[in-house]
Structure formats: C-alpha cells, structure tokens
Amino acid sequence: MLSKAIECFQAKPDDRGIVITRNTCAVLLAVYAACIFIWDYTIAYQAALVVMLGVTLALYRGRLLRLSPYFVTSGLFLLYFLIHTCVGLSGNVRYSTEYLVTLTINLAAVMCILCIVDSPRKIELVMKALIFTAFAIWIYALIVERQHLFSGMLGAKHATIPKPIFKGRYSHNNLPMFAGYAVLFLSYFRVKHRPIPFTWALYAFFMICVLMTGARKALLFTMFGILGYPLMFSKKQERPSNKTAKLLCLVCCVIVAFYLIMTNEKLYAMIGSRFAGFIAGFLEGEFTESSARSRSIMFTTALASAKEHPLLGIGLNNFRTLEGSFKTWSHNNFLEILVSGGILPLLIYYTYPVYAFVRLVKIRKDPMAGMFLSYMVYTVVHDCLSVSYIGRTTGLMMGLVAAYLEIYDRQKRRRDVTFHHSDGITAGACEQ
C-alpha cells in the first residue's frame, strides 16, 4: 500500500502544480538560510524552519524514505547523545538537553534540504540569497556601529551589534563569517562564468568589513574564498605547470597580505598584533596574547578530560562545567566532541565529512564541487579553532554538500543509462 502511494505521488514529476510548489519550497529554503544569518537564536529562524518542514512533509513524503548517508550519520550522532544523556552519563543534564534540542532542530533542517534540493540551480538560489543577506547585514552593521568602524574590533564586546526587530546581538565571530561565505559564493559564480553584478566591488566591501572586525578565522576564510578556490579549482582541464603557477601565486598573495598587516600601523593594531601574539606564544611555549592564552588553557583542560574519560566522555555540552573552561566551549570541535561523548561520537560525526571530502576530490574540476571542497578544507582548520557541530550554518552547508553529491550521482546514472541505450541502438543498427 505504501509503495503504491509513493508511486502515485511520483507518477507525474513534470506536473505544473507540483513543479511550482517545489520551486516554492526552494524559496522557503532560501528564506530559512537567510534567517539563520540574520536571526539565529531567535524565533524568526524557528518559524521559517517550521513552515519549511511542514511543506516538506506534505510534499516530499515519498522522498523521506530515502536515507542519505549524511542524514544517517547525523541521526546516529543525535541518537548516541540522547541515549548517553538518558542513561545518566551526562554530568549536567540541563546543558545536554539544550544541545539535544538544537541537534534535533538541525537534523530536521537537514532532512528538508535533502528533500528540496534536487538540482544545482536550487543550491545557487540559496547562495544568491546568502550573498544578498550578508551584504544587507553589513550595511545595517556599519550604520548602527558607525562610531566604532575603525576600532579594529567591530562587533566585539564593547561594540556588540543588536539584531534588527528581534532581541539578540551578532557575535564578534559570526558577523565577519557572513562576509566569508558571501565571498566564497561570489567566487563560485565567477568561476562558473556567470558572475554576480559588481563582484569585485563586493569582494572589496566584504574584505574591508572583515578587516574592521580583526577576526583572524574570517580573514583566512575570506582570503581562501577570493584566492584559494578560484586558483586551485577553476578549470576542468589544466596543465600541471599552470596548477603550480597558481599555487605559487596564492602563496605570494598570502605573503603580501601578511606583510601589509604586520607593517601597516593601522592594520597591525587591528589584527596584526593578534597574529604576532599567537606566533610568539607558539614559538616560546607561553602565550601572552589574551585570546591565544585562554584557548591554550581550554585545550589543556579538554585534553586532560579526554584522557580521563576517553570512552564515554562527561556529557554533551559539559565541557563548560570544567575548571579552566571559562564556562564556554573548548574552541576545538574535535576535543569538544571527544570530551562530550568519547571516541565513538567523534568517529560518527567525521565519517561523512571524510566520505564527502574523498568524493569531492575526485570531481573537484566541477565548479560547485570545487567550491564545496574549498569549504571543507577550511572547515578542517576552523574545527581546530572553534566548535561547529552545533552550528546551524554548518548543518546548512553540509546539507547542501550532501544534496549536491546525490544530484551528481543521479545525473551520472542518467548519463550512463543514456549512453548504454544509445550504444545498444547503434549495435542493433550495425547487426541489421
């Protein structure tokens, strides 16, 4: 009975009403993506998710039965910590419950993404929406905090930026990352030879915005989006000598940028001093720069806890209960998961990223595959310096990666079927 219902539902995929409704779902996904940029941690993004989830459940009921590898690993990750908390292995149940709710919300969003996104154009729609959203957020931020534009710490504690309409404030780390994502997406359309209008002006705008925050991770992400992705994954056919030249060009650009940051008085005060403090602390074994020193203490605390509880951990989101945690997360995704639940959830969580990375490497000459590969390369660095498994933006991006790989597989199967069919017709004609 169920299989017949599914067949009836999928019997007329080109029906005009269904196509219009599914395109509407893509718009709802773009709205949800914009909401997690603008109004994360507010009821606005939750309302957008509820609407998108309701329409998805009604429209894509047949596709829900097809389990994506990413959905499976995300579900197992959530199930592990649900059992972990229920059997009393969490030191602080309230902290764990808060993150369990977030993981459930993220899993629902992933399910919607995998159902709705069935073509590259829908991924591009989300990307365009986020470029516009990042630009709008930054225009708003510059207007609201015009007195702190050149403080070098725009969006930091002394100049936090309130979110429009709903309560809450943009964090010093998230605000510049919006610009980083926008730059990566702009580079995709440029590599695809369908550039967004005023691409280079937007590059300059977003780079200046990142510099005004003094955020190191966002600066690295932005530089990689402007230079790394277009230089390393831009053409389908290219000589090895050209690849080497591009790599050398990338290294030179990074060196020049680093030199300017370290020698220009204004840039050094804004961001160079933080780089200098980190490098000096790494070489001398003792960090003096405040951010690097606190992270060093947190890493030491996390490692000690992981060694003491390597198999089961101390509970989801329980690192913040340890002395030396500064009552926050560990700023290292690997250690955070290891401390929370031990080795098993760490392996579950990174199973799909490793799988996706290997797949993307094989097809990296496709512009969209190259873009997602660039994102995942950066994510490895980012996860060493921050916690991402709970982030809604991370779930959105990984959901789009999973959807893209499924689209690629479907298109490849169709090409193979077409090729074998045409080959069979040719063979039959020859026999006649």
Image: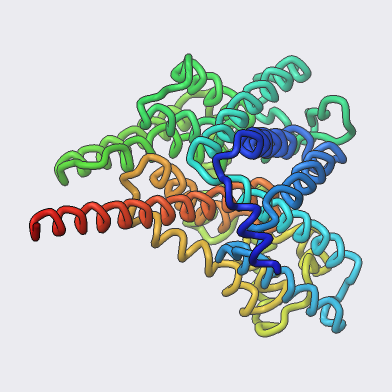
Outermost front residue? 432
- Please report the residue visible at 59 percent of the width from the left and 54 percent of the height from the top: 385
User: What count of labels does the image hold?
Assistant: 0
Q: Nearer the viewer, residue 412 or 398?
A: 412
Specify whether 200 is left or right of 125.
left
Q: Position of residue 208 (x, y in %)?
A: 55, 22
Q: Position of residue 117 (x, y in %)?
A: 57, 45
Q: Position of residue 45 (x, y in %)?
A: 79, 40
Q: Position of residue 398 (x, y in %)?
A: 57, 53
- Please report the residue visible at 74 percent of the width from the left and 73 percent of the height from the top: 79
- Please report the residue visible at 68 percent of the width from the left and 18 percent of the height from the top: 139
Q: Is residue 155 above or below residue 326?
A: above
Q: Nearer the viewer, residue 54 or 353?
A: 54
Which quadrant of the figure contains the N terminus? bottom right
- Please report the residue visible at 86 percent of the width from the left and 36 percent of the height from the top: 168
Q: Is residue 274 above or below residue 352?
A: above
* Residue 292 appears in the picture as rendered: no
Q: Nearer the viewer, residue 296 or 88?
A: 88
Q: Is residue 229 above or below residue 379?
A: above
* Residue 271 appears in the picture as rendered: yes
Specify whether 257 is left or right of 221.
left
Which quadrant of the figure contains the C terminus? bottom left
- What's the image's color scheme? rainbow
